[in-house]
Image: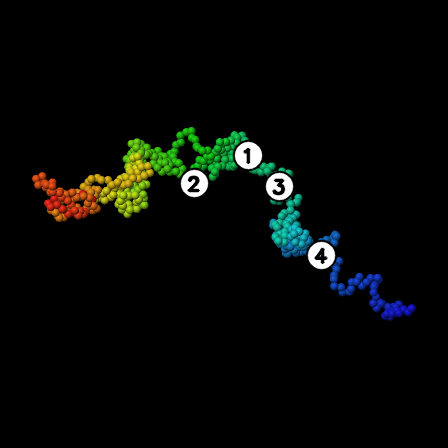
């Protein structure tokens, strides 16, 4: 067996200061030791500032409080951590601070708002303790004062819910004026209450509508007092007022908003004059329902105008009617002629209408009857009055119904006889005969005849002269 061993010794082994390159030192690898000029640093025992978090199961000793008096801390500045700072009260926004400086403790349990709000406790002078919470999204809330045995009591502003276990409603408020005696007393000030009961709850006095005084009984109420600047009011929930004595007024009794009133000498109801023996009679304007016991329907009133577009078949109410213009009459249905007219409607078993045209020269009149739903025809009335005439051996008479009588003499055969008045429409008949004023020359054997009769005349056929009478219209 051949073993080759290479030993590098600088100098003599017994006096060498180091081996050229050992793998271990006292059994430790080189990674176990820090090299000279290492790049990480430790916290100095003599005091130092850490750049990261220090985690340990517990700490013993003092905690340094940094002076950050001018710097505000926001809820989002902390991430699952707490800190203590020296602050100005003005930087913290403490209201009514106890001193210029506060020790401020800030804590945030989580890295964002999902873990709940951040908290701050500010400790000032004279035992002043303040507390608030905040979130990253909303910022800090207002400061709340923390009460303790050192800052409660008189003047502290503490508003407790209970005093010795009792609510404030269990105590009477302090006062410096005397009570009103139950036996009777005189008040020097105003007594205010929602209502005042008299003997029992059935009768009481309280405030009514619109600041009025309400007198209430178990039957209802009366509100008394002005409810606006214009009136003094008496209101009730009962259907009527009852007065067991006469009601008197200085000038007038009046019903509200109706123009109904009475004075000592006159009165009105809804603006209408109240009539009595002292103000009726001639010129009073009294419109009575009856006159000497008869209704107005018993008398004919003023004529009523019939406008264009009407129908005389609809006029069945007794009275006088008229149409003053031809142009209107032409547009009125069921008239006998289209002239202006007067109409008299009378009552019998049915209705009678009498129609008279307006003309002054030979005015005509028609009448008709209505019965059981049917109108009869218009019938022209014949008055028999002569409206025109010419009297003599040759002449005529014209009547108001248009009938005309012509008469005269005519020569021998072949002579033409002209009527004194031409018939406007038709000649009905011509009667001829011998002309004589006595019976001496009359010959009944000599007949006369008229031929070629027209509305204006005829031709004679007898050999002797004669006379005639012609009828027509």
Q: CA distance from mark 4 to mark 2?
A: 80 Å
**Helix, strand or loop at disc 2?**
loop
- Residue in the image at 56% along x and 38% along y: 175
User: In this rendering, which labeled residue sits more in front, label 4 or label 3?
Assistant: 4
Q: Which residue is mark 4?
A: 53
Q: Is residue 53 above or below residue 371?
A: below
User: In this rendering, which labeled residue sits more in front, label 1 or label 4?
Assistant: 4
Q: CA distance from mark 1 to mark 2?
A: 37 Å
Residue 398 visible at all: no
Which is nearer the eye, 81 or 181? 81
User: In this rendering, which labeled residue sits more in front, label 1 or label 2?
Assistant: 2
Q: Position of residue 305 (x, y in %)?
A: 29, 42
The image quarter in which residue 409 lies: top left
Q: Which residue is mark 1?
A: 179
Report the disc number at residue 229.
2
Q: CA distance from mark 2 to mark 3?
A: 47 Å
> Upstream in the sequence, badge 4 or badge 3?
4
């Amino acid at each position: 067996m051949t073993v080759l061993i290479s030993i590098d010794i600088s100098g003599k082994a017994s006096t060498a200061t180091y081996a050229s390159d050992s793998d271990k030192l006292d059994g430790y690898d080189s990674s176990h030791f820090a090299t000279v000029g290492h790049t990480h640093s430790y916290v100095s025992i003599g005091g130092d500032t850490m750049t990261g978090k220090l985690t340990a199961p517990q700490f013993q000793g003092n905690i340094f409080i940094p002076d950050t008096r001018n710097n505000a801390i926001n809820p989002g500045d902390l991430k699952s951590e707490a800190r203590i700072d020296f602050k100005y009260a003005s930087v913290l926004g403490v209201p009514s601070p106890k001193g210029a400086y506060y020790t401020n403790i800030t804590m945030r349990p989580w890295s964002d708002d999902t873990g709940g709000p951040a908290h701050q406790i500010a400790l000032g002078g004279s035992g002043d303790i303040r507390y608030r919470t905040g979130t990253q999204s909303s910022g800090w809330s207002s400061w709340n004062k923390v009460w303790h045995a050192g800052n409660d009591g008189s003047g502290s502003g503490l508003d407790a819910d209970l005093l010795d276990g009792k609510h404030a409603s269990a105590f009477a408020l302090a006062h410096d004026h005397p009570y009103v005696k139950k036996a009777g007393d005189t008040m020097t000030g105003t007594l205010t209450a929602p209502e005042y009961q008299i003997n029992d709850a059935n009768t009481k006095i309280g405030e009514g509508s619109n600041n009025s005084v309400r007198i209430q009984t178990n039957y209802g109420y009366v509100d008394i007092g002005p409810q606006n600047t214009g009136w003094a009011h008496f209101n009730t929930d009962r259907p009527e007022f009852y007065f067991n004595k006469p009601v008197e007024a200085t000038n007038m009794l009046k019903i509200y908003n109706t123009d109904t009133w009475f004075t000592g000498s006159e009165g009105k109801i809804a603006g209408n004059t109240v009539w009595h023996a002292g103000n009726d009679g001639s010129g009073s304007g009294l419109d009575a329902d009856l006159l000497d016991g008869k209704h107005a329907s018993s008398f004919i009133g003023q004529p009523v105008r019939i406008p264009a577009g009407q129908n005389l078949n609809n006029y069945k109410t007794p009275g006088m009617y008229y149409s003053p213009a031809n142009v209107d009459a032409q547009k009125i249905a069921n008239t006998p002629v289209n002239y202006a007219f007067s109409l008299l409607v009378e009552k019998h078993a049915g209705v009678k209408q009498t129609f008279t045209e307006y003309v002054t020269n030979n005015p005509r009149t028609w009448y008709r009857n209505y019965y059981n739903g049917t109108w009869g025809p218009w019938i022209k009335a014949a008055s028999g009055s002569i409206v025109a005439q010419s009297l003599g051996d040759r002449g005529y008479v014209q009547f108001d119904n248009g009938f005309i009588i012509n008469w005269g003499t005519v020569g021998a055969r072949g002579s033409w006889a002209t009527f004194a008045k031409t018939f406007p429409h038709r000649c009905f008949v011509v009667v001829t005969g011998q002309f004589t004023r006595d019976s001496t020359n009359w010959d009944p054997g000599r007949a006369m005849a008229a031929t070629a009769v027209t509305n204006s005349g005829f031709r004679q056929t007898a050999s002797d002269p004669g006379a005639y009478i012609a009828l027509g219209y």
